[in-house]
Image (spheres, coloured by chain):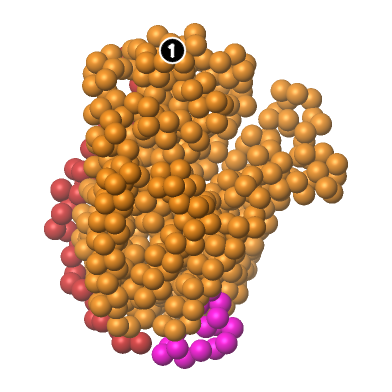
Amino acid sequence: MLGFASLEVALSFWLTLAASGVCVVYGVVNWNKGGNGAPPRTED
Amino acid sequence: MLTKVVITVSYMLVVFYLGYRGWRDTKVATDYMLAGRRMNPFVMAMSYGATFISTSAIIGFGGVAGLFGMPLMWLTFLNIIVGVLFAMTVIGKRTRRMGLALDCLTFPELLGRRYDSRFAQGFSGFIVFLFVPAYGAAVLIGISRMIEVSLGLDFNVALVGFTLILALYVITGGLKAVMYTDAFQGAIMIVMMIILASFTYSKLGGVVDAHQTLSDMAHLMPAKLQKGGMLGWTQGIQPGTPIWLTVYTTIVYGVGVGVLAQPQLAVRFMTVASDRELNRAVLYGGLFILFLPGVPYIVGALSNAVFFEEFGKISIAMAGGNFDKIIPLYIEKIMPDWFSALFLMGMFAAAMSTLSSQYHVGGTSIGRDVFEKALRLTNGQTFKATQMGVAVTIFMTLIWAWVLPGGVIARATAFFFGLCGAAFLPAYFLGLYWKGMTRAGAVASIVGGFATSMLWLLFVHLKEAKAIGLSQALFGQVTLVADAAKGSWVWLLQWVDPNVVALPVSILLAVGISLVTKPLDEEHINLCWSKFES
């Protein structure tokens, strides 16, 4: 519980850390995926 | 004082250099409005985060955490999952691709071209232009007050000086200058937060001990707040009470979900070259949001324990009842002197990164989406029209900061978030995923969502209705449901965020009307979807 007095609050803390971790893992796993080069520069 | 001046001047020099870099690299309208669609993912993510988090998230919401405690962490959780992961992957990738297929340079233009509707673009652009300066004015007033207190400058001098500095690089350098400076400002904010969190936790004997100390203080929660539903700073809130509704609907739902359809954030998805950059930006963004706003919320809550140990008073008592003063007071009384000078720079960074993006998005909306369409300008004139638009937005923000009453200004952020969510989210999100969305459905959803949100804010939601006073003037009562039996669900509506009502209305209008109206040409839909495969 990390010193928090309710599950509601402890959960918010843990889930925030986990969510950030998910973003890091997502970024690492997909680091080189989806690259299709820069689009042609439009002159306007 | 000398340290503060030296730090401020050094900071401004770096900002000017980055603004100059942005100006130097800006040649065409795509550069000015979308940073050439070639932005680095790190810069994009830092800029997204720094724009997202303003001084009000640190000072204002940090102070709210001082009052209501840790349940605010749910907002950080939502900000990461919804505002970063969902936004960049589910929404961002398709926004980028559709924006490219339809050659869009602004968020309202994306809506307009997706639905082949000049009205959708013009109306959305007008909403953005109208409400961005009010939201900007709130940020501008906040930082000018801080300059007044910290550097001893006159408030009006601070207001105009700060505006001129921003005007210089936003008008000339466009989105490149905005994003380069944002990334630098974002980095400063992160460093501040790491120092703030480490210092606070170590002062209270470590992470678990700090939380435990705060948990043991539940009996010190003021009686008025206990009556409103507060159980303690780490104990949560009694469900169904006014405070519970305020925290979970306004703060968590309103701000957490409202972020998805904010034009100044959505436009950033179109600044990168491919999905790969968005994948990488998820990593940076997920970490950024953990620190900001995560740290101000934690420190805001823990400030109660620190103040109590040092002065025998909880935070709100220390701040004389004004929760906006909790974080500044904590910096002044608890943090070392050297930190307060750095913190001022952090606040400059937070305010400037948010304001520059607001000026830019308001200016491109009035320039590209309203002027250009109304005056039927050619593409070559867009650049100038947009620069003019940015100048007009900056001027309007300054005027709002001078003339609008303080109460209205303070509510401007909630207004802006509520309106964006209800007016734009269904037309935007469904437009990216559902080929059956029609022009009539989109227009009804944008106008209906906007109207419902406005009506709710003016006549039902207590904070805005009371600050604006229209309900009082027209009907003689502060809100339309103020007379309902105290404690009944009708009475409690006064604390329910407008998005809880206006967003479902907007979704129903979008889906319902699209199902019974003529779909858009297949050829047009194919064009919209043309970049989705690959």
Q: Nearer the viewer, residue B231 or B209?
A: B209
B189 lies left or right of B524: left
Q: Which range of residues does the magenta coloring cover? A: B366-382
State which chain disc 1 sits on. Answer: B
Please determine whether, in this image, residue A29 is positioned above or below residue B231: below
Q: Residue beneath label 1, please? A: B312
In the rendered image, residue B480, in percent from the top left (x then y), is placed at: 79, 40
Question: Residue B180 occupies which quadrant of the picture?
Answer: bottom left
Badge 1, how many Cα within 10 Å: few under 14, some, many 20+? few
Chain A's colour is red
Q: Is residue B377 magenta?
A: yes
Could you tell me if residue B1 is visible in this image?
yes
**Amino acid at circle 1:** Gly
Which residue is depicted at the point 41% across and 44% down? B150
B157 lies left or right of B296: right
Could you tell me if residue B422 is visible in this image?
no
In the rendered image, residue B218, in percent from the top left (x then y), is placed at: 46, 11
In the rendered image, residue B288, in percent from the top left (x then y), is placed at: 28, 45
Q: Nearer the viewer, residue B442 or B340?
A: B340
Chain B's colour is orange
Which residue is depicted at the point 50% across and 67% down? B394
Please determine whether, in this image, residue A43 is positioned above or below residue B493: below
Outermost residue, front direction? B2
Q: Nearer the viewer, residue B273 or B362?
A: B362
Q: Quadrant of the N terminus of chain B?
A: top left
Please determine whether, in this image, residue B248 is positioned above or below residue B185: above
Q: Quadrant of the C terminus of chain B?
A: bottom left
In the rendered image, residue B208, in percent from the top left (x then y), is placed at: 27, 16
